[in-house]
Image: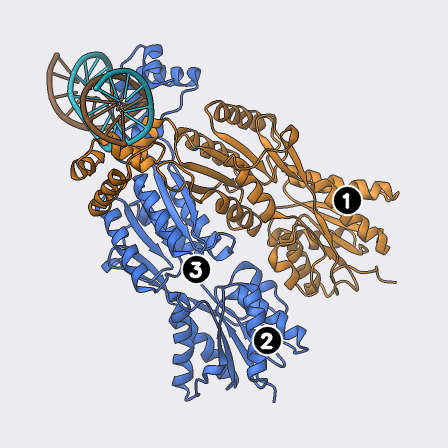
Chain colours: A blue, B orange, C cyan, D brown
Amino acid sequence: MTLADVAARAQVSPATVSRVLNGNYPVAASTRERVLRAVDELDYVLNGPASALAAATSDLVGILVNDIADPFFGIMASAIQSEIGGPGGRAGGERLAVVCNTGGSPERELTYLTLLQRQRAAAVVLTGGAIEDAAHVTAVGSKLRKLVDAGTRVVLCGRPPAPEAIALTFDNRGGGRRLTEHLIGLGHRRLGYIAGPEERTTTRHRLEGHRDALAAHGIEDDPRRTVHGRYDRAAGYEATLELLRRDPSITAVVAANDTVALGACAALRDSGLRIPDDVSVAGFDDLPFSIDAVPALTTVRLPLAEAGARAGRIAMGREEPPAGGIATVGGELMVRGSTGAPRE
Amino acid sequence: MTLADVAARAQVSPATVSRVLNGNYPVAASTRERVLRAVDELDYVLNGPASALAAATSDLVGILVNDIADPFFGIMASAIQSEIGGPGGRAGGERLAVVCNTGGSPERELTYLTLLQRQRAAAVVLTGGAIEDAAHVTAVGSKLRKLVDAGTRVVLCGRPPAPEAIALTFDNRGGGRRLTEHLIGLGHRRLGYIAGPEERTTTRHRLEGHRDALAAHGIEDDPRRTVHGRYDRAAGYEATLELLRRDPSITAVVAANDTVALGACAALRDSGLRIPDDVSVAGFDDLPFSIDAVPALTTVRLPLAEAGARAGRIAMGREEPPAGGIATVGGELMVRGSTGAPRE
DNA sequence: CTGTTAGCGCGTTCAT
DNA sequence: ATGAACGCGCTAACAG
């Protein structure tokens, strides 16, 4: 079943069928009608690889995420996809917006980029924090450059800027600073910090913000009060127990994100400590479940859906990229019940 | 930059380069070495559309989900992808496992299936509940049949069986029954039920299980005690207020899933009711956050990751499909603090 | 507005 | 074990 079959049935040339299907060319209404009817009767579906080969472009758009099971990425991916999925692709049809889960692995990130390059993807959106390993940064950078050179639009969303691409970057440092300042303002002086994996930019920036705030208020940054772990609940649980072991006098725990904060809350409760009476807890991201924690979680809201939608539009060329190719998206401090004044 | 360029540099024919890259054919070790070096030096990347066209197959595998921002789907998608992503694709390389977010829209589901058909996808995995609208069921069915006929492997994961495909289906009905039986066993007689969207199979099956349990214990199924809504927190919140309005004497609320249950908890708290002292609450799925609710949520655990992994392996042909093409995956009742005996 | 022609880059015969 | 030749199905120039 090929274009030629449709053409024969509709009594036109294959080229005309192609023009009808792609809609990028004037075709007489009556002809179009006839062709579409033939397409329908034959149940014809365009051969994607063949058109991609002939046209040297494809309808595929890749979205790379670090962890698809984490709503942080799910929300962004959903927003990106909704801006891309609509009509406007080749073949009068839709684009195939597609989410690739790297699982946080540098190798898989590169593999997916290669695969998308191989498919001649129309655009690629990379989301979330990057790995800071020098070799990997170089490798990704050169991959992105090749993609850009090949005509693929590359957008970073919630990821630090890179010279090769347009970036919408989150103000993790500023958010981290304001969050810790909020706690300091409440009177806290001994704050535990649960950071994410060491090599992630998100981890580093949020931690730097925290330290900025401590320094600005003349509070010593005791390294024993910082623990690194994964961005998941179990890590938050473990890290909190470790923090309490190292220094039972802490009055607040700042977590790398909301998921980790939930683990921290569980650990505190299991240790017989009340929130926020004994220990305050703060998260980051403001994921949907954060407001349901008891007490509700103080956190920094990141406009994930808005940023994702914008990244999607830029990737589609439907919105102007920001001046200089970089835009910083700020977070908003959400003060809720999980933080309060320290015990006496 | 094409195969021919690599061939020239390696002093061999294009055919040989193709054979080295695809590894499906004997090639002298020395020749292979030379070719691979040329590939490396030229930074050559195979043209996906061209190979797919010539070979009439592609490395693309599609995973359809109803809501990518919902961890229920994220967890399954992650497991599926991890089984697919590995080596074993064409071109000695990896497969491009790709997640498509339908957002619960029938149109987008069909669109994505067409897009994957157009790309000549190697396999497609559809996850989660299906829409019961007759026209849509027919449309999807015929689409799946065409995909199967075209050589695409189609697997359903957490979705009711269809004649066109292999299915791993969740025992939603049994899980729903056991959950409600648990509450009845605690002494509850007036149970509110928050169901999902009307037209979803998951909704219907869970609700049927609930009703089975009521009937088995001679409890009248008062229709005023069932409310339908979306599978999200806000819907759970609203629905709970509605249930309380209709019948303030209910002693338990069973929710369509954990996310909805969290909304229910919030509504009960905001209404001044204690959980489980005044009203018990139960969810479904056992998503990671459910254990962090206060009190922890009684729910039915579905082995999402295991089922996803198995679906992925079947889609790759690395595991035998179940006998008869259908396997039912059971849920496990997790009794936690959110359910208890009714007040006096 | 429509038909004709010539590739797009690769896999796969068929030879050797 | 390797090379030559053909065609996969479609799009894009170029005519008309």
Label 3: few (<14), some or many (≥20) within 10 Å?
Answer: some
| Residue identified by numbered label 2 | A241
State whether residue A106 is above or below residue B23: below
Closest to the observer: A238 or B137?
A: A238
Task: Say which element carries label 1.
Answer: helix
Using the image, name the chain to which the residue with label 3 belongs.
A
Given the image, on which type of amino acid does mark 3 rest?
Pro
- Dot 1: chain letter: B
The residue positioned 56% from the left and 84% from the top of the image is: A247
Image spot of residue A319 (x, y percent): 30, 49
Tell me the mark number nearer the camera, choosing from 2 and 3.
2
Single out the mark in the foreground, 3 or 1: 1
- The kind of secondary structure element at disc 2 is helix
Q: Are marks 2 and 3 on the same chain?
A: yes
Q: Is residue A176 left or right of residue B296?
A: left
User: On the image, numbered disc 3 is attached to which residue?
Assistant: A303
The answer to whether tags 2 and 1 share a subunit is: no
- Horizontal and vertical percent position of residue B284: 68, 50
Among the two numbered marks 2 and 3 on one chain, the one whose residue lies closer to the N terminus: 2
The relative height of residue B69 versus residue D11 in the rendered view (above or below) is: below
Q: Quadrant of residue A31?
A: top left
In this rendering, the answer to whether B214 lies above or below A67 is above
Q: Is residue D16 left or right of residue A109?
A: left
Q: Position of residue B185 (x, y in %)?
A: 85, 53
Whether residue A256 is visible, yes or no, is yes
The type of residue carrying mark 2 is Leu
Residue at coordinates 47% horizontally, 29% vertically from top-left?
B152
Q: Which residue is mark 1?
A: B177
